[in-house]
């Protein structure tokens, strides 16, 4: 099998796995957001927005599979800025909840967070093989890892709310989730920018997608005759 054929097989595998985690995260976004709204839980809603960000991340990762390094870096850059925006939004939402003094339903928080944890563990296992991959796939794995920590935090907050008889554990965990997202976004943005600078002057290489600008390539490198 030629190098390009091997790349095509690898790209197909990556797309399949990314589609799986995309569907899982998109589904859990709706489940968590609705449950967070009903339970009046800021941390659950923050986690749902994190799920939404991940779904977009995986969509961008699907776009980037088989593309040039510059295109992958640009995709990761969009990913980073999206996560940064959502993190800031969650912090603003926490301020609003503190102002309204709404108390969350710890029962709904616990069970929905546990369900989200199971989903994110599944995604983490699926994406584990990409932890040392290109910047875009590595960003997807980092998102999954952060989600597991966030889910555990929401469960801890749900257990603490009735003990302290206050919504502060919910708000605190929501703030931690937001700050983790913002920190991860900064790392992704920094790495993507570094890769854009590093690949700016490099010529496009053979890929399974028609990505070279100003040059003609076959739809599949496997079709080329040597």
Image (spheres, rainbow, N blue to C red):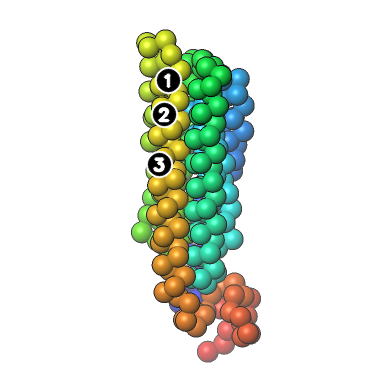
Closer to the camera in the image, 112 or 70 = 70
Along the horizontal axis of the image, is 103 left or right of 134?
A: right
The CA distance from mark 1 to mark 2 is: 9 Å
**Quadrant in the picture for residue 148:** top left
- The answer to whether one can see residue 103 in this image is yes
Q: Do the residues labelled 3 and 1 touch (CB within 8 Å)?
A: no
Label 1 Cα neighbours within 10 Å, binned few <14 / some 14-19 / many ≥20: some
Q: First in sequence, mark 1 or 2: give its number.
A: 1
User: Where in the figure is residue 195, as x and y percent of width and height?
Assistant: 43, 68
Give the labeled residue for mark 2.
173
Q: Which of marks 3 and 2 is nearer the N terminus?
A: 2
Where residue 210 sits, quadrant-wise, is bottom right
- Mark 2: which secondary structure? helix
Please report the residue visible at 58 percent of the width from the left and 53 percent of the height from the top. Answer: 59
Secondary structure beneath dot 1 equals helix
Badge number at residue 168: 1
Whole-Å distance between the Cαs marked 3 and 2? 10 Å
| Residue 155 visible within the image | no
């Amino acid at each position: 099998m030629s190098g390009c054929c091997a790349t095509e097989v690898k790209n197909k595998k990556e797309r399949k796995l990314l589609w799986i985690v995309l569907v899982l995260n998109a589904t859990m976004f709706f489940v968590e957001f609705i449950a967070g709204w009903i339970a009046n839980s800021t941390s659950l809603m923050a986690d749902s927005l994190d799920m939404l960000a991940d779904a977009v991340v995986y969509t961008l990762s699907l776009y980037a599979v088989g593309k040039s390094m510059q295109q992958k870096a640009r995709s990761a850059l969009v990913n980073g800025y999206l996560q940064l925006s959502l993190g800031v939004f969650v912090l603003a939402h926490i301020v609003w909840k503190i102002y309204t003094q709404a108390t969350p339903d710890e029962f709904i928080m616990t069970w929905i967070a546990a369900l989200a944890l199971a989903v994110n563990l599944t995604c983490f296992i699926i994406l584990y093989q990409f932890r040392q991959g290109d910047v875009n796939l590595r960003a997807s794995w980092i998102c999954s890892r952060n989600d597991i920590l966030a889910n555990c935090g929401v469960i801890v907050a749900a257990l603490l709310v009735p003990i302290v008889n206050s919504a502060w554990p919910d708000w605190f965990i929501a703030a931690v989730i937001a700050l983790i997202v913002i920190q991860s976004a900064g790392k992704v943005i920094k790495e993507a920018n570094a890769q854009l600078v590093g690949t700016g002057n490099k010529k496009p290489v053979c890929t399974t997608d028609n990505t070279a600008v100003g040059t003609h390539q076959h739809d599949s490198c496997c079709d080329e005759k040597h």
